[in-house]
C-alpha cells in the first residue's frame, strides 16, 4: 500500500492541492481568498502536467547536450530516455501565462468591487447590493465623494 | 388520383394577401383610402386566383406547388384537391364582402388601430388559404399556427380588460393545441415517414391500434380546440369581445373553419374511413361530437348577448360538420363537407347583421331588439333568411346539407344521430325565431326610429349579398362556384370510385 | 442558504477528490519512461527538433515552432488580460465632469 | 506565415513551405480566419492611440475577413468534404492542425456573422457608454471573436484551451464594465469559469497521460482501446463538467444569468448568443468526434445523466424566467432552458436528436442575438428593461418591436420562424428514443416561452390605460414620439430578424447540405 502510494505520490500531492484550491474557491467568503484558492487550483494542474513529463533513470532537462548537437552529431544516437518529455513543459508555460492573466483580470475586478462597495467580503457585498436593489441606503455606507 | 398540374397559383393565392398586409402596414393611417384599396385589391385578386383553380380541379386534376424541402420527404408544399379547394373558395369568396363590411364597420365606429386591424385580417386570410391548400400535415400546421398568431391582435382589438383576458384565453387554448398537434404530427411522421395527405388515409398499417387511437385523440384535440368541440370550446364565446367583422371572419371564414378543416383532413385524409372502421372508434368520435351538437344548442338558448348566442350556434354547427364526416358514410360526408361551405355563408350573414345592428344602434343583446326590424328591415330580412337556413328550412342552402346529413345518419343505421341532427335543427328554431319575431312583430322599444334607418350601405350590401347567395346556393347548389360538384369530388377522392 | 454553503462546497470538493483518486488507480507511475505520454509524441521532438529548428533547447523549439500557434495564443492571452485591465481600470476624464 | 528559413537545419521545413506556397489562395483561408482578427486586435490599440473614431470602421473591416474566409471554408467543405490545415507545415500529431468539417464550418460562419453584426451594433454604445475607451472595447471584441473562432476551428485539444481562455478573459473584461452588479458577477464568472477551463485542462491532461497525444483525430484512433481505463473515465468526466460550466448547463449555470444581465448591452449581445453555443459545439465534439458515440451511451451512462440534467435545466430555466420582471434577466434565464434543449437533443443519441441540437445551436444563436439586440436598442433609447416599461413601446419603436416579436414567436416555436424547426427535430429525436417525458418537457417549455413573451408583447402593443375604454381613434397616439433604434443598431436587428425567418424556411436546405453530414455517420 505504501509503495503504491509512493509510486504515484505526485498524483496525491496534486489531488490534495487541488482540493484545497477548490474548497477555497467555493467555500471561502472573502474574495481575495477565493482568488488565492484559484491560484492554488491552477498550480495543482500545472504540477500534474509537469510530473507527467518526468522520466526516471537519469533523464535531464530537454536541452540537448553538446555531444548530441552540432555539425558532427549523429541523429540516431540521441537517446530519448536521456531527456525529459518537453511537451508538458511547453503546455505548462502557456498554462502559467494563462493563470497569471486570469489572476490579473480577477484582481482588476476586485479593485472595481472594492471601489464600489468598500469591502471584499462577499456577504457584506450581497447585503449592500440587496439594499441598492430595494432603493435603500446601503447599510455599510461610505460616502464616496 | 388524376393528373397533377404544377403551378404556382396556390402560392400566389397565399402570398397576395400577405403582401397586401405589409402594404397596409406601410401605408398606415395617413392614407386610409389607399390602405383599404390594398385590402379590396388583394381580396379580388385572391378570389380570381382561387376561382381559376375550380375548373382544373373539377376536371379531376390536382394543382401542386412545392416551395422548399422542410424535412426529408416533407416539403412546404401546396396541393389543391377538391376538399382543400372548397375551403379555399369559401374563404376567398367571403373575404370580399367581409372587406367591404369591415371598412364600413370600422369607419362607422371610428375604431382605433385600423392599420393593425386590416394587417391582421389580411394575414389571417393568407394563413387560411395556406391551411386550405396545404399538401401535407406540416404545411398545414405552419399556416395553422400563423393563423393562431394573426388572429390574436384581432381578438384583443378593443384592448380593454375583457378583450385582453379573452385574448389570453384564446392564446392558451390554441397554443396548447398547437403543441399537441406538433407532437401528434411528429409521431405520425415517425410512424409513416410521410405527411402527405392521401384520400382515404395513409396511416393504415403503421403502428399499433392503441397508439393510433391516442394519435387520433391528440389530433382531434389539437384541431378540435379551434373547431370548438365541447370540452375545448370555452375560448370561443370569450373571443366574442372582438369587433363583429372579426367574429364573422373567425366563425364563418377562417379560424374555426380551419379547425374543422383540420379535423376532417385528419379523419379522411390521414386516418381514412377504412382505418377508423377497423379501429372501431368512429362511434365514440361521433358520440362526443353529437354531445357537443346538443349541448351547444342548449347553451345557446340561455344567451342574451346576441354574439354569444351566435357563438354557441357556431359550436353547434361545426360539431355537426364533424359529426357528418365521422359517420363515415357517403351521404353524411357529403352533407358534412357541404355544410362547411353553407354554414359559412349563413353564419357570416348573421354576424354581419349583428354588427350592423351594433354599429347603428349600439345594441348587442337579444332583449334589446324589440321592433328593430321596422327600422332595419333589410338587415332583419337577411337575418331571417340565414337563420332559416341554419334551421334547415328550404330553400336556403342549409336545407341541402342537413338533408344529406340526415340521409347519412339513416344510412349508418344509427338513428340516435338522426335524432341528434333533428334536435339540433329544432334548437336552432328555438333560439333564432324569437329574435326574428321580436324584431318584426313586437312593440318597438321607445328608442327605435319609426322610419327605415339602416346602417351604412357599405355594410348592408354585403350582408344582403351573402343572404342572397345562401338562397341561390340553396336552389342551385352548383351555381357559380360549383360547391356541390366539388364536395362530390372530394367525397369520391376519399372513398374511391 | 448561507448556513448550507460550506457543507455543500465541502461535499463537492470531497466528491471531486474521490473522483480524482479513483482516476489515480490506472495512472502511470511517476517518472515511468515508458508511460504513454513519454512514448507517443515526445520522442520525435527530442530526436528531430534540433535538426529541424536549429535550437538545442527542445522546449523552445516546440514552443516556438511546432506549437507556435499555442504561443501566439499565449501572447494573445497576455494581451487580452492587459487590455481588459486597461479597459476596466483606466479612468476617462470627461470635460466638466471629474469624478475622482 | 513563417518566413522561408535559410539555415541548413531546415531542409525539411523548406520543402513544406514551398508546397504550401504553391497551393491556391483558398488553402490559406483557415489560417486567415484566426490570424486576421488576432492581428487586427493587436493593431487596434495602436490605431486608437490617436484616432479613436477609426477603431469602429477598422474593426468592421477586420471582421469581414473571417466572415469571408469562413464562408469560403464552408463552400469548400460542401464542395470537397472536410479538410485540415497544418499550421507552420508540421504534420498533425506533432504540430497543431486546423480541422474544418461540416460542423465547424457552419459554426465558423455563424460566429463570424454574429460577431460582425454585434460589432456593428456596438457603435452607438462605443460613442456614449465607452467614450474614450473605444480602442480597448473593440480590441476585446476582436479577441473575443478570435477566441470563439479558434475554439471551433482547431483540431488540437490544448489549442482549444488557449482559445477558450482568450474568449473567457476578453469576456471577463467586457462584462465587468457593465452596470452596478457587473464586477461582482464577473468575479463569480471568473471563479466558476476558471474551474470550468481548469477542469477542461485536467481532462486534456488525463487524456494526454493515457495516450500521449493532444490531436483530436489522433486521439480518436487511440482512445477506443482504452475505453475501460479509469484515467479515460475520469478525464471524460472532467471534460464534460468543464464544458458544461462554460455552457451554463444546469446546475452549473449559476454564473450565467448574472453575468449576462449585468454586462453592457452591446457586450451581452456578442457574448450571450455565442459563448454557450460554442461550448455546446465543444460538447458535441467531445462526445462524437473525440470519443465514439457509444462511449457516452453504454460505457458510462452519461447520455442519460445529460438528458435528465437538460430536462431540469429546461424546467428551472423556464420557471426562473417566469419569476423575472427584468426582461434582460428573463432572456438570460431562457438561455438556461435553451441550453437544456441542445443538451437534450444530444443526450438522446440519435440522428434526429443530434440534427435538432445542431440546428438549435444555429437557430438559438440568432434568436438570442435578436432578443439582446432589441433589448439593447430599447435601453439605448432610454426605456427601462422592466416589463411595465414596455407599455406602448410598439408605437415608439415599431421596427425594433417587430423584430422582438419575430424572435419571441420563434422562441415559442411558431412556424415558419426557425425555432419551430429545431424543436421539430428535437421532438422527432425524443420520439425515436421513446423519451416521452422529454418530448412533453420540450412542449411545455415552448408554452412557458409563449407566456413569457406574450406578457411582454401584450404590454408593448396595447395602449396605456389612460386611452383605454373608448373606442375612438387614439389621438394621443400621435403625440408619442416615434424614435426607433439608430441605424447601426437597426441593421443588425433587421438582419437577425430576417435570419430567423430565412433559417426557418431554408432549414431543410441547411440540413440537407450541411447538418446531415455533421451528424456522425454511425447514426
Image (cartoon, coloured by chain):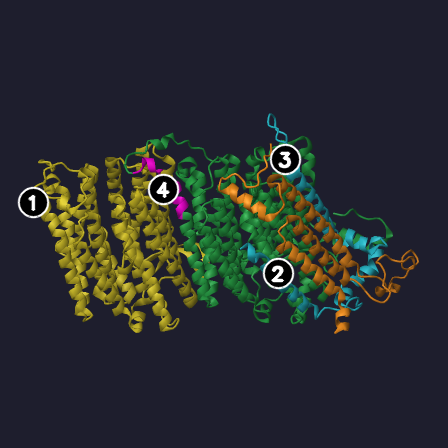
Chain colours: A orange, B yellow, C cyan, D green
User: Which label's residue is closer to the chain start, 4 or 1?
Assistant: 4
Q: Nearer the viewer, mark 2 or mark 3?
A: 2
Label 4 and label 1 in one chain: yes
- Judging by the rendered image, the residue that carries numbered circle 2 is C10
Res D133 label: 3
Q: Nearer the viewer, mark 3 or mark 4?
A: 3
Q: x, y (%) of residue D277?
A: 56, 53
Q: What residue is shown at x 36% (from left), y 33% (from top)?
A: D477
- Judging by the rendered image, the residue that carries numbered circle 1 is B442
For the residues bearing labels 3 and 4, Cβ distance under 8 angstroms: no
Q: Secondary structure at mark 4?
A: helix
What is the C-alpha distance between the residues marked 4 and 1?
45 Å
Q: x, y (%) of residue B102?
A: 26, 41
Q: Nearer the viewer, mark 3 or mark 1?
A: 3
Q: Is C63 on the left or on the right of B485, as rendered?
A: right
Residue D184 part of the magenta segment: no
Q: Nearer the viewer, mark 2 or mark 1?
A: 2
Q: x, y (%) of residue D215?
A: 69, 60
- Judging by the rendered image, the residue that carries numbered circle 4 is B21
Q: Secondary structure at mark 3?
A: loop
Q: Which residues are magenta?
A: D454-468
Label 3 and label 4 in one chain: no
Q: Is B151 on the left or on the right of B351, as rendered?
A: right
Pointer 2 local density, CA inside 10 Å: few below 14, some 14–19, many at least 20 = some
Q: Is B60 on the left or on the right of D442, as rendered?
A: left
What is the C-alpha distance between the residues marked 2 and 3?
42 Å
What is the C-alpha distance between the residues marked 3 and 4?
45 Å
Res A28 label: none
Q: Nearer the viewer, mark 2 or mark 4?
A: 2
Query: Quick check: can you spot residue B349?
Result: yes
Amino acid at each position: 500500500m505504501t509503495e503504491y502510494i509512493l509510486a504515484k505520490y505526485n498524483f496525491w500531492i496534486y489531488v490534495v492541492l487541488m482540493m484545497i484550491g477548490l474548497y477555497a474557491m467555493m467555500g471561502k467568503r472573502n474574495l481575495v481568498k477565493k482568488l488565492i484558492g484559484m491560484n492554488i487550483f491552477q498550480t495543482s494542474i500545472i504540477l500534474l502536467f509537469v510530473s507527467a513529463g518526468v522520466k526516471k533513470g537519469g533523464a535531464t532537462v530537454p536541452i540537448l547536450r553538446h555531444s548530441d548537437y552540432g555539425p558532427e552529431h549523429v541523429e540516431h544516437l540521441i537517446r530519448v530516455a536521456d531527456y525529459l518529455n518537453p511537451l508538458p513543459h511547453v503546455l505548462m508555460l502557456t498554462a502559467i501565462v494563462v493563470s497569471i492573466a486570469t489572476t490579473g483580470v480577477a484582481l482588476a475586478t476586485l479593485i472595481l468591487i472594492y471601489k464600489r462597495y468598500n469591502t471584499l467580503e462577499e456577504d457584506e457585498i450581497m447585503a449592500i447590493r440587496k439594499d441598492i436593489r430595494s432603493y435603500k441606503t446601503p447599510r455599510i455606507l461610505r460616502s464616496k465623494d | 388520383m388524376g393528373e397533377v398540374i404544377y403551378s404556382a397559383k396556390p402560392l400566389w393565392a397565399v402570398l397576395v394577401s400577405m403582401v397586401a398586409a405589409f402594404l397596409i402596414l406601410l401605408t398606415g393611417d395617413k392614407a386610409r383610402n389607399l390602405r383599404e384599396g390594398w385590402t379590396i385589391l388583394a381580396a379580388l385578386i385572391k378570389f380570381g386566383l382561387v376561382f381559376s383553380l375550380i375548373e382544373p380541379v373539377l376536371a379531376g386534376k390536382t394543382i401542386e406547388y412545392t416551395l422548399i424541402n422542410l424535412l426529408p420527404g416533407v416539403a412546404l408544399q401546396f396541393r389543391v384537391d377538391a376538399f382543400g379547394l372548397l375551403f379555399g373558395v369559401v374563404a376567398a369568396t367571403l373575404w370580399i364582402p367581409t372587406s367591404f363590411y369591415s371598412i364600413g364597420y370600422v369607419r362607422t365606429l371610428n375604431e382605433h388601430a385600423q392599420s393593425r386591424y386590416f394587417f391582421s385580417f389580411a394575414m389571417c386570410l393568407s394563413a387560411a388559404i395556406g391551411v386550405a391548400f396545404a399538401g401535407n400535415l406540416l404545411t398545414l400546421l405552419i399556416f395553422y399556427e400563423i393563423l393562431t398568431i394573426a388572429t390574436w391582435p384581432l381578438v384583443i382589438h378593443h384592448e380593454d380588460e375583457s378583450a385582453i383576458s379573452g385574448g389570453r384565453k384564446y392564446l392558451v387554448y390554441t397554443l396548447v393545441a398547437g403543441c399537441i398537434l406538433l407532437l401528434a404530427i411528429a409521431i405520425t411522421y415517425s410512424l409513416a415517414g410521410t405527411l402527405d395527405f392521401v384520400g382515404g388515409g395513409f396511416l393504415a398499417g403503421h403502428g399499433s391500434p392503441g397508439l393510433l387511437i391516442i394519435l387520433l385523440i391528440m389530433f382531434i384535440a389539437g384541431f378540435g380546440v379551434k373547431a370548438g368541440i365541447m370540452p375545448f370550446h370555452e375560448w370561443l364565446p370569450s373571443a366574442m369581445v372582438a369587433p363583429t367583422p372579426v367574429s364573422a371572419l373567425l366563425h364563418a371564414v377562417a379560424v374555426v373553419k380551419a379547425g374543422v378543416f383540420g379535423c376532417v383532413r385528419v379523419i379522411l385524409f390521414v386516418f381514412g374511413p377504412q382505418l377508423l372502421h377497423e379501429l372501431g372508434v368512429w362511434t365514440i368520435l361521433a358520440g362526443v361530437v353529437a354531445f357537443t351538437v346538443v349541448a351547444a344548442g342548449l347553451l345557446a338558448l340561455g344567451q342574451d348577448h346576441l354574439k354569444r348566442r351566435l357563438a354557441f350556434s357556431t359550436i353547434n354547427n361545426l360539431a355537426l360538420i364533424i359529426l357528418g364526416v365521422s359517420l363515415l358514410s357517403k351521404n353524411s360526408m357529403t352533407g358534412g363537407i357541404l355544410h362547411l361551405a353553407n354554414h359559412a355563408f349563413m353564419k357570416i350573414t348573421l354576424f354581419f347583421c349583428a354588427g350592423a345592428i351594433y354599429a347603428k344602434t349600439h345594441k348587442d343583446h337579444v332583449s334589446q331588439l324589440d321592433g328593430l326590424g321596422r327600422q332595419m328591415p333589410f338587415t332583419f330580412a337577411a337575418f331571417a333568411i340565414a337563420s332559416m337556413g341554419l334551421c334547415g328550412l328550404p330553400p336556403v342552402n342549409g336545407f341541402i346539407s342537413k338533408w344529406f346529413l340526415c340521409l347519412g345518419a339513416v344510412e349508418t343505421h344509427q338513428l340516435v344521430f338522426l335524432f341528434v341532427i333533428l334536435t339540433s335543427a329544432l334548437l336552432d328554431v328555438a333560439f333564432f325565431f324569437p329574435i326574428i319575431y321580436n324584431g318584426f312583430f313586437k312593440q318597438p322599444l321607445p328608442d327605435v326610429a319609426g322610419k327605415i334607418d339602416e346602417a351604412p350601405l357599405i355594410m348592408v350590401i354585403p350582408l344582403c349579398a351573402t343572404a342572397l347567395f345562401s338562397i341561390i346556393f340553396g336552389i342551385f347548389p352548383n351555381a357559380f362556384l360549383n360547391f356541390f360538384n366539388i364536395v362530390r369530388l372530394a367525397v369520391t377522392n376519399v372513398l374511391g370510385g | 442558504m448561507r448556513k448550507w454553503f460550506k457543507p455543500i462546497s465541502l461535499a463537492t470538493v470531497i466528491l471531486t477528490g474521490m473522483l480524482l483518486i479513483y482516476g489515480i488507480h490506472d495512472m502511470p507511475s511517476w517518472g515511468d519512461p515508458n508511460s504513454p505520454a513519454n512514448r507517443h509524441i515526445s520522442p520525435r521532438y527530442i530526436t528531430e527538433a534540433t535538426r529541424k529548428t536549429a535550437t538545442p533547447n527542445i522546449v523552445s523549439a516546440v514552443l516556438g515552432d511546432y506549437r507556435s500557434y499555442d504561443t501566439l495564443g499565449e501572447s494573445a492571452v497576455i494581451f487580452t488580460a492587459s487590455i481588459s485591465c486597461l479597459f476596466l481600470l483606466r479612468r476617462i476624464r470627461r470635460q466638466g465632469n471629474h469624478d475622482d | 506565415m513563417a518566413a522561408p528559413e535559410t539555415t541548413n537545419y531546415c531542409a525539411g521545413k523548406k520543402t513544406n513551405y514551398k508546397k504550401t506556397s504553391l497551393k491556391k489562395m483558398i488553402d490559406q483561408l483557415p489560417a486567415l480566419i484566426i490570424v486576421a482578427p488576432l492581428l487586427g486586435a493587436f493593431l487596434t490599440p495602436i490605431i486608437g492611440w490617436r484616432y479613436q473614431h477609426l477603431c469602429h470602421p477598422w474593426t468592421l473591416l477586420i471582421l469581414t475577413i473571417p466572415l469571408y474566409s469562413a464562408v469560403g471554408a464552408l463552400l469548400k467543405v460542401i464542395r470537397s468534404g472536410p479538410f485540415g490545415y497544418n499550421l507552420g507545415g508540421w504534420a498533425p500529431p506533432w504540430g497543431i492542425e486546423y480541422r474544418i468539417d461540416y460542423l465547424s464550418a457552419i459554426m465558423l460562419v455563424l460566429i463570424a456573422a454574429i460577431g460582425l453584426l454585434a460589432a456593428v451594433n456596438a457603435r452607438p454604445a462605443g460613442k456614449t457608454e465607452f467614450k474614450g475607451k473605444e480602442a480597448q472595447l473593440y480590441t476585446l471584441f476582436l479577441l473575443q471573436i478570435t477566441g470563439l473562432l479558434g475554439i471551433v476551428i482547431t483540431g488540437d485539444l490544448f489549442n482549444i484551451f488557449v482559445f477558450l481562455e482568450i474568449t473567457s478573459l476578453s469576456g471577463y473584461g467586457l462584462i465587468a464594465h457593465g452596470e452596478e452588479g457587473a464586477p461582482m458577477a464577473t468575479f463569480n464568472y471568473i471563479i466558476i469559469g476558471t474551474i470550468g477551463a481548469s477542469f477542461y485542462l485536467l481532462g486534456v491532461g488525463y487524456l494526454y497521460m493515457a495516450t500521449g497525444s493532444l490531436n483530436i483525430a489522433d486521439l480518436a484512433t487511440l482512445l477506443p482501446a482504452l475505453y475501460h481505463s479509469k484515467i479515460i473515465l475520469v478525464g471524460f468526466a472532467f471534460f464534460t463538467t468543464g464544458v458544461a460550466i462554460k455552457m451554463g448547463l444546469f446546475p452549473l449555470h449559476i454564473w450565467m444569468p448574472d453575468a449576462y444581465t449585468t454586462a453592457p448591452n452591446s457586450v451581452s449581445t456578442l457574448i450571450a448568443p455565442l459563448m454557450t453555443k460554442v461550448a455546446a459545439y465543444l460538447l458535441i465534439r467531445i462526445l462524437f468526434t473525440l470519443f465514439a458515440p457509444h462511449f457516452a451511451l453504454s460505457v458510462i451512462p452519461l447520455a442519460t445523466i445529460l438528458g435528465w440534467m437538460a430536462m431540469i435545466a429546461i424546467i428551472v430555466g423556464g420557471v426562473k424566467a417566469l419569476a423575472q420582471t427584468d426582461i434582460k434577466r428573463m432572456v438570460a434565464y431562457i438561455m438556461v432552458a435553451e441550453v437544456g434543449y441542445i443538451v437534450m437533443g444530444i443526450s438522446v443519441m440519435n440522428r434526429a436528436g443530434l440534427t435538432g441540437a445542431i440546428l438549435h445551436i444555429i437557430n438559438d444563436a440568432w434568436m438570442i442575438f435578436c432578443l439582446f439586440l432589441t433589448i439593447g436598442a430599447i435601453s439605448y433609447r432610454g426605456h427601462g428593461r422592466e416589463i411595465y416599461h414596455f407599455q406602448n413601446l410598439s408605437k415608439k419603436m415599431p421596427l425594433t418591436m417587430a423584430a422582438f416579436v419575430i424572435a419571441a414567436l420563434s422562441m415559442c416555436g411558431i412556424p415558419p420562424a426557425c425555432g419551430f424547426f429545431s424543436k421539430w427535430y428535437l421532438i422527432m429525436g425524443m420520439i425515436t428514443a421513446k423519451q416521452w417525458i422529454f418530448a412533453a418537457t420540450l412542449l411545455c417549455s415552448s408554452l412557458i416561452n409563449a407566456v413569457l413573451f406574450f406578457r411582454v408583447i401584450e404590454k408593448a402593443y396595447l395602449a396605456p390605460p389612460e386611452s383605454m375604454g373608448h373606442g375612438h381613434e387614439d389621438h394621443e397616439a400621435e403625440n408619442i414620439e416615434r424614435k426607433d433604434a439608430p441605424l447601426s443598431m437597426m441593421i443588425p436587428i433587421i438582419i437577425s430578424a430576417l435570419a430567423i425567418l430565412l433559417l426557418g424556411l431554408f432549414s431543410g436546405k441547411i440540413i440537407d447540405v450541411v447538418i446531415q453530414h455533421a451528424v456522425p455517420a454511425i447514426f
